[in-house]
Each structure stands twice: as C-alpha cells, then as structure tokens.
C-alpha cells in the first residue's frame, strides 16, 4: 500500500493536480499492474481528500452569507 500520510497536508489544488497526473498515467496503460494498483490507491486517497476540502469550503461559504440588514446568517449555498 502506498504512503498517503503526506496527503493531509496538501492543498486542494496540489491534491487535484496529482490526482490528474495519476489518472493520466492510468489511462495511458503503460504502468505495470502492481504500480497501477498503487497509483489507484493513492488516487482514491487524493479524491477523498479533495472531497473533504470541498465540503469544508462549502460549509465556510454557507456561514458567510450576509442578509439584507448586514447581519451574517447561515443560508445553504448552492453549487451547480
């Protein structure tokens, strides 16, 4: 199993960039089977990290909504 301890310290952008490289390498079909499995496992960990970062950002945006009287309120943010 690949080492994924460093992923927690990555920014969303860093994790996404590495995930894109992994997807490209896997799509090329050039890596040996064992290396492909390790890349896939790391990619899954990177994907989970990105999803966690996006959810945290979504929650922060919900808290920053300003109402008509200038009072900060929590309204659901919609991302489409």
Image (spheres, grey):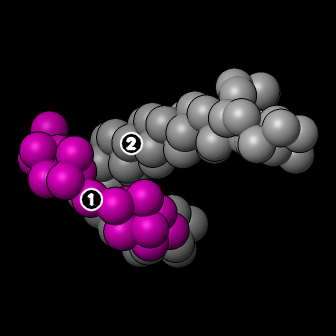
Q: Name which residue lies at 61% across and 33% down.
A: 63
What's drawn in magenta, residue-wise? 1-20
* Res. 40 in view: no
Question: In the image, 7: left or right of 74?
Answer: left
Q: Name which residue lies at 77% across and 27% down.
A: 75
Q: Residue 10 versus residue 66: which sits nearer the camera?
A: 66
- Number of marks in picture: 2
- Mark 1, Cα crowd under 10 Å, few <14 / some 14-19 / many 20+, is some
> x, y percentage for residue 36?
34, 55
Q: Residue tagged by mark 2?
A: 49
Q: Residue 23 versus residue 14: which sits nearer the camera?
A: 14
Q: Is residue 60 above or below residue 28?
A: above
Question: In the image, 16: left or right of 62?
Answer: left
Question: In the image, 10: left or right of 69?
Answer: left
Q: Residue tagged by mark 1?
A: 10
- Cα–Cα gap, marks 2 and 1: 9 Å
Q: In terms of image quadrants, where is residue 76?
A: top right
Q: Name which residue lies at 14% across and 38% down.
A: 1
């Amino acid at each position: 199993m690949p080492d994924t301890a460093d992923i927690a310290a990555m920014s969303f952008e860093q994790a996404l960039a590495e995930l894109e490289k992994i997807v490209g390498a896997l799509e090329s079909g050039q890596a040996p089977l064992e290396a492909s499995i390790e890349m896939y496992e790391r990619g899954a960990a990177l994907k989970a990290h990105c999803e966690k970062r996006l959810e945290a950002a979504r929650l922060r945006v919900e808290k920053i909504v300003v109402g008509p009287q200038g009072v900060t309120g929590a309204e659901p943010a919609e991302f489409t």
